[in-house]
């Protein structure tokens, strides 16, 4: 059951990353220059009120964690994060392989 949920979340993130890639591509063509949507902009759009509290809660737990991990991730392109995270979740949720040379049916 958990493997199913991981795969569904992986497919959703992969689809969201592709949509963000198409959106950035269309915006880049319209503006005659490269335009990418950072993850911080997506977070601010989805979670309007709680977006500012994210930095405060991470810095409250471990101040170095925001500078080392949080800030670079929020400045990364949302399409890249969605595609990579979706692919990793699909890889983790794949069914196990049957061993070669073992009889599986009685």
Image (cartoon, grey):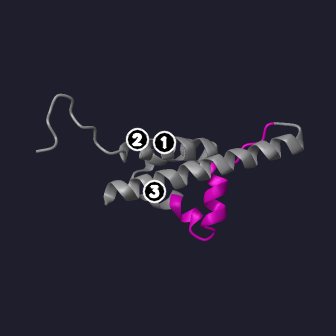
Task: Locate residue 92, reporting x and y percent.
Answer: 36, 44
Q: Earlier in the sequence, mark 2 or mark 3?
A: 3
Task: Locate residue 53, reporting x and y percent.
Answer: 53, 65
Q: Secondary structure at mark 3?
A: helix
Relative to the observer, which residue lies in front, 9 or 55?
9
Q: Which residue is mark 3?
A: 8
Picture residue at 67% right of the left edge, 55% below the top = 41
Picture residue at 60% right of the left edge, 67% below the top = 47
Relative to the observer, which residue lies in front, 96 or 106?
106
Q: Secondary structure at mark 1?
A: helix
Q: Residues within 10 Å of mark 2 (few under 14, many from 20)?
A: few
Q: Are marks 1 and 2 in contact (CB under 8 Å)?
A: yes
Badge number at residue 91: 2
In the picture as drawn, the residue positioned furthest to the left comes out as 106
Q: Give the quadrant of residue 2.
A: bottom left
Q: Are marks 2 and 3 in contact (CB under 8 Å)?
A: no
Relative to the observer, which residue lies in front, 14 or 68?
14
Q: Is residue 103 above or below residue 2?
A: above
- Name the side, left or right, on which 99 lies relative to 5: left
Residue stretch rendered in magenta on the structure: 34-54
- Of the 4 image quadrants, the one containing the N terminus is bottom left
Cα distance, mark 1 to mark 2?
6 Å
Picture residue at 61% right of the left edge, 48% below the top = 17
Q: Give the quadrant of residue 24.
A: top right
Q: Residues within 10 Å of mark 3 (few under 14, many from 20)?
A: some
- Name the side, left or right, on which 80 lies relative to 29: left
In the picture as drawn, the residue positioned furthest to the top comes out as 101
Q: Which residue is mark 1?
A: 87
Q: Secondary structure at mark 2?
A: helix
- Of the 4 image quadrants, the one containing the C terminus is top left
Examine the structure image and report whether residue 71 is included in the region drawn in magenta: no
């Amino acid at each position: 059951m958990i493997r199913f949920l991981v795969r569904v979340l992986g497919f959703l993130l992969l689809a969201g990353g592709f949509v963000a890639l198409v959106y950035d591509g269309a915006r880049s063509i319209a503006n005659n220059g490269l335009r990418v949507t950072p993850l911080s902009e997506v977070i601010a759009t989805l979670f309007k009120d709680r977006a500012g509290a994210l930095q405060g809660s991470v810095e409250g737990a471990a101040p170095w964690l925001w500078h080392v991990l949080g800030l670079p991730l929020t400045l990364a392109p949302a399409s890249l994060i969605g595609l990579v995270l979706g692919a990793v979740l699909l890889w983790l949720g794949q069914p196990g392989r049957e061993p070669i040379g073992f009889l599986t049916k009685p």
